[in-house]
Image (tube, helix red, strand yellow):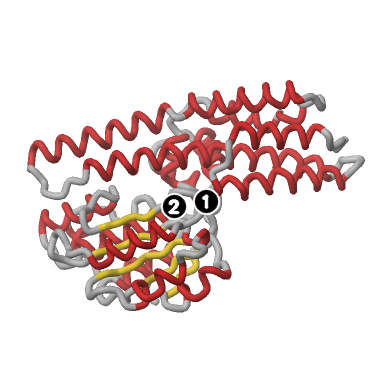
Amino acid sequence: MTSLSEQPVLSAEAEGVDLWADVVGQDATVAELRAAVDAPVHAYLLVGPRGSGKRALAAAFAAALLSRDRVGPDAARHARLALAEAHPDLTVIERKGASISVEQADEIIAAAWRASVEGGPKVLVLDEFHLVTSAGPKLLKSIEEPPAGTVFVVLAEQLTADLVTIASRCVRIDVPAVDDAAVAERLVAEGVDPERAADAAAAAVGDLRRARLLATDDRVALRRRAWHAVPDRLDGTGGRAVEAADELLAMITDAMAPLAEAQAAELAELEERVKARGERGSGRADLVARHKREERRYRTDEIRAGLTELARRYRDELTVAARPQASLAAIDAVTELADELVRNPNERLQLVALFVRLSNLDTR
């Protein structure tokens, strides 16, 4: 495979659009997707852990496809709309419940057969498809033989039994985890203080977009310390468990201010662009819907990052623990909740239950 520097410049890139600006540490995957732009197949499956950049890769690939046959400023317009997930011929499907439902499968099929708004290709990004269950068989025909010009990009954290048949109809691209150091290096290159960049990268667990937000948050280190100190606060009573959970959740609510500011700026930029150029298919409603999804994802990511820090605390204690089995049980309990977060639990009840469980494990 040719290196990035040896591959031809894509049409939007010729207009100064950095399609891959939100992707870090994935040079091999970027090269593979760039090479596919000129003659894409009907479906791709990107498999990798949360935070590996699959969503950013999918948006960049969609931007390259949707701007491929455009020239000049028109190519840039198509690319920028796609990167913002606001292009009328880009459909992003996210689960609405614990898994991809049959009703959502109907939406995907309808979107695949809908005529192109801009007269070019259509791209459907199917997020978190490791959670597809009974809806999988219904989607098989559409993914295997979509209408001409339609490209599916399926994202999954792992290849589950329910996803195997769909995967066999896709070109699989493995997306490895991103090292915290790579994210921190990118932040430093963008002007972030090295210490702040390291804290943001550790809390973002490989997600560059989230790391950029966290780098503007003065309280990232404070939240990490609060999660790290949870075992010191627990005394075996439900009252202390509730108190710890409520304080952490309040900190997460406060931490969402940078996201709100970024979303307001993005919406204002869209409104200015529409006002100045009257862009067709500006996608305001889609942008607002995406912002709501981002808010939900942000809370989940904050809790997951906190649980990672909490598990790190117990791992650090393993070497000196008098009862290593209790420390291992604590790590298992924390990991179990992190896995369950994808199924939309009541976060407060789940955290309280976890903290009560941890307080009954004597790891010292």
The front one of 34 and 310 is 310
Question: Quick check: 229 above or below 109?
Answer: above
For the point 15% across and 49% down, the residue is 281
Left or right of 141, for residue 199: right
**Which class describes the residues within 10 Å of circle 2: few (<14), some (14-19), or many (20+)?**
some
Reading the image, the residue beneath label 1 is: 98
Give amino acid for label 2: Arg
Report helix, strand or loop for mark 1. loop
**Which class describes the residues within 10 Å of circle 1: few (<14), some (14-19), or many (20+)?**
some
Question: Quick check: 202 above or below 144?
Answer: above
Report helix, strand or loop for mark 2. loop
Give amino acid for label 1: Ala
Q: Residue furthest right?
A: 322
Q: Quadrant of residue 275?
A: top left
Q: Position of residue 137 (x, y in %)?
A: 45, 71
For the point 74% across and 48% down, the residue is 332
Q: Residue furthest left?
A: 277
Q: Position of residue 317 (x, y in %)?
A: 80, 40
Reading the image, the residue beneath label 2 is: 95
Q: Position of residue 7 (x, y in %)?
A: 30, 71
Which quadrant is home to the C terminus?
A: top right
The front one of 44 and 51 is 44
Left or right of 290, for residue 196: right
Q: CB under 8 Å between callouts 2 and 1? A: yes
Q: Quadrant of residue 101?
A: bottom left
Number of marks drawn: 2
The front one of 56 and 144 is 144
Q: Position of residue 68 (x, y in %)?
A: 20, 66
Estimate the spatial distance between the alpha carbons at disc 2 and disc 1, rounded to whole Å: 7 Å
Any mark on residue 89, and which? none
